[in-house]
Image (cartoon, grey):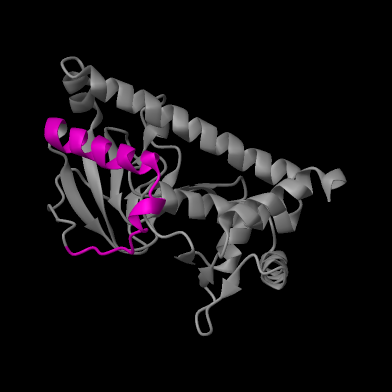
Amino acid sequence: MLDSSAAVATASNFTVPLAPPERVRPAARRIPEAMALIGRTLAPLRHLVHEGDAICRAGQRFDCLYILNSGCAKIFSLTGDGREQMVGLKFRGDWLGLDGIATGQYTCSTVAMDTGEVWIVRYQALLDAASVQPALLTLLHAEMSRQISRERESLMSVCTLPADARVAEFLRLWADSLDERGLRNDQITLPLSRAEIGNYLGLTLETVSRSLSKLARHKLIAFAERRRRDLQIPDVDALAAYVQRSVTPTLQ
């Protein structure tokens, strides 16, 4: 679990494969601009995290928001019988801990999935700064809105799509998240096991494996020879079209 007094770490050693300049979406500029505003006006504490590190835990008193500057994280909650249920995936520029604002304590736990850097911002400091920098409040509201939209998309996927399309949509959203951040989305490494993907999508491990194999047979994805977590997505639009056909089967 991170503390706001944690040691500062820089992100200068993190390297990521960048997308070719012509493929970077205009939305890719939003995240650097937002991070620059936060860094300039709030001087957040910076903390290096590694795979498995807890960023915040359910039940912990809320006083800080966390923003991913690099790496990715998973959010999970406990079911009534004590099992962990993954409920969210976060990437660079995403805010963590917003669920704690209403009740004064975090309702979900967030864990790093790889090496990355987290910026720690005290919530009261954010509100104080927003009184003289309205752009910060706009940024906070925009992030809340994006998270609501993503959660709705995820719920719709689980409720309406068959298994194969659910896995395809998961990969499409992952690729789009990379693309929005100016990263390559045709070759991705998933830091999640098949079981974790199944947990997130409401599928069994075996169903996820069968769905991935089916997508590979349709040449929508391809596996690396040695690492089954390394995937190639030749055409993200083709993946999206596959999902759409499953929703509107009369068009097949």
- Percent position (x, y) of residue 164? 72, 59
Magenta stretch: helix, strand or loop mostly? helix
User: 162 above or below 229?
Assistant: above
- Percent position (x, y) of residue 195? 60, 65
Q: Is residue 29 magenta?
A: yes
Q: Is residue 50 magenta?
A: no
- Percent position (x, y) of residue 112? 36, 57
Q: Residue at x 20, y 34 (%)?
A: 38
Q: Is residue 74 at all visible to an observer of this figure?
A: no
Most distant residue in the top direction: 131
- Percent position (x, y) of residue 61? 32, 35
Most distant residue in the front direction: 22
Q: Residue at x 72, y 65 (%)?
A: 207
User: 159 above or below 146?
Assistant: below
Q: Residue at x 14, y 56 (%)?
A: 10
User: 30 above or below 179?
Assistant: above
**Residue range of the region highlighted in magenta in the rendering:** 13-41
In the visual, does 30 lie left or right of 129? right
Most distant residue in the right direction: 250
Foreground pick, 50 / 108: 50
Q: Residue at x 71, y 54 (%)?
A: 242
Foreground pick, 178 / 134: 178
Q: Is residue 179 at all visible to an observer of this figure?
A: yes
Foreground pick, 103 / 50: 50
In the visual, does 247 lie left or right of 172? right
User: 45 above or below 142?
Assistant: below
Foreground pick, 71 / 123: 71
Number of numbered markers? 0
